[in-house]
Image (cartoon, rainbow, N blue to C red):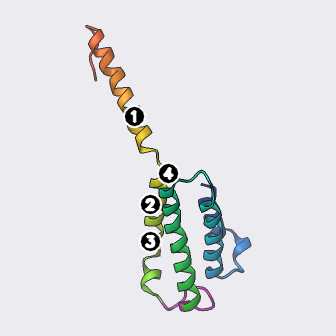
Amino acid sequence: MAAFFMSCMLFEMELFDPLSEASLYLLTFATYSYVITCKSLTCIQRMGCGTILILSLTLAYDAYFYGLGGVYGEAETVIYNNIEYLALCSHIIFISTLTPYRRIGNSIGRFVDSILLLSRNSAYFMPI
């Protein structure tokens, strides 16, 4: 989460306004490259983080070579036109690898089992 907020901070704070957009994407790459080296991440989580790394490099390349002075200008490429969708998809992929679906499913199952146990043992229990 800290890496996500750091990358948001890079683009929103006035402190980083003198930097070109390509440099900001490279700083985002550096932030997520630190995250990918964490030993607690599984292989699938590393692959999800890798999608953000690839996207950061792609956006930096696109801004540097097709933008004006490292900032997107009049030259709108396919990547620039779909930048929000690409970022959204890569972050969804990364966040979905961090979500413990098995634990959530087990918790829901235990909750349903407890309601069923109450309804079996009580003559006056009416499920809503």
Q: Name the amino acid, label 3.
A: Leu
Q: Which residues are magenta?
A: 66-75
Asked if the residue at tag 3 contacts the one at tag 2, i.e. Cβ–Cβ closer than 8 Å, the answer is no
* Extreme-top residue of the structure: 123
Which residue lies under the disc numbered 2? Answer: 93
Which residue: 38% across, 33% down? 108
Measure the alpha-carbon separation of dots 1 and 3.
32 Å
- Disc 4 target residue: 98
Q: Pointer 1: what residue?
A: 106
Mark 1 secondary-structure assignment: helix
The prevailing secondary structure element of the residues shown in magenta is loop
> Which one is earlier in the sequence, the residue at label 2 or at label 3?
3
Q: Earlier in the sequence, mark 1 or mark 3?
A: 3
Circle number at residue 84 = none
Question: Dot 3: what SS?
Answer: helix
Which tag, 4 or 2, sits closer to the chain's start? Answer: 2
